[in-house]
Image (tube, helix red, strand yellow):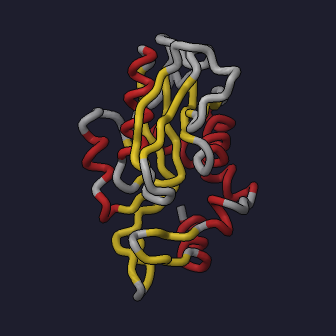
Amino acid sequence: MKSLKERILSEGKYLGNGILKVDGFLNHQLYPDLTMQMGREFCKRLSQHGVSGVTKIVTAETSGIAPALAAAVAFDAPLVFARKKRPITMPDGYFSSEAPSHTKGGITTLMISPEYLRADDQVVIIDDFLATGLTTKALIEAIQKSGARVLGIGAVIEKGFEGGRTVLESFGVPIVSLAVIERLDESGIYLRD
């Protein structure tokens, strides 16, 4: 996705330790046109891989919500985001799994209410980053506990050098990334064509 790649190269900042700051257009400030374009692109590419009949889009709060909402609009499906802290309104019997947080440090528990994810749901997972793949893997595990089926995975930015795609390929679903970073260091950000 050309417009996304241009933003990454012009506004992205390498902070060391594999961290890419993209707060200006993805994680803190958003450009609605760019975000909605991401959603349409996810829908187009996943559909080209045979994904159809999507009944839910699932992401992890917080940074995945905007691109996941854009995808939900494109797929015309509700968005469900996994919570990192259980609200008092969430009933017992929620579906959960744990994942390490690269940017925040420590282990995060992801929780989805049984009110919003059912065994007959057909799910696409959308997130801002695909790095180690462990957050997406945790989402898949929580979704599988509900009995729902994961149809595909989308990431706005994939850090190709962190091996997350390899972790997720065992689930046998299409994985779509709108931009793939091959290398990230003090000398620059290097994107796959």
x and y, in percent, of residue 172 in the image: 28, 33
* Residue 106 higher or lower than 80, as above or below: below
Is residue 119 or residue 42 the one in the foreground? 119
Q: Is residue 33 visible?
A: yes
The residue positioned 41% from the left and 21% from the top of the image is 149
Q: Is residue 192 left or right of residue 41?
A: left
Which quarter of the figure has residue 134? top left
Q: Is residue 2 left or right of residue 50?
A: right
Which quarter of the figure has residue 23? bottom right
x and y, in percent, of residue 11 in the image: 61, 76
* Residue 97 higher or lower than 147, as above or below: below
x and y, in percent, of residue 177 in the image: 44, 53
The residue positioned 42% from the left and 45% from the top of the image is 107
x and y, in percent, of residue 103 in the image: 49, 60
* Residue 124 higher or lower than 20, as above or below: above
Which quarter of the rendering shows the C terminus? bottom left
Q: Is residue 40 visible?
A: no
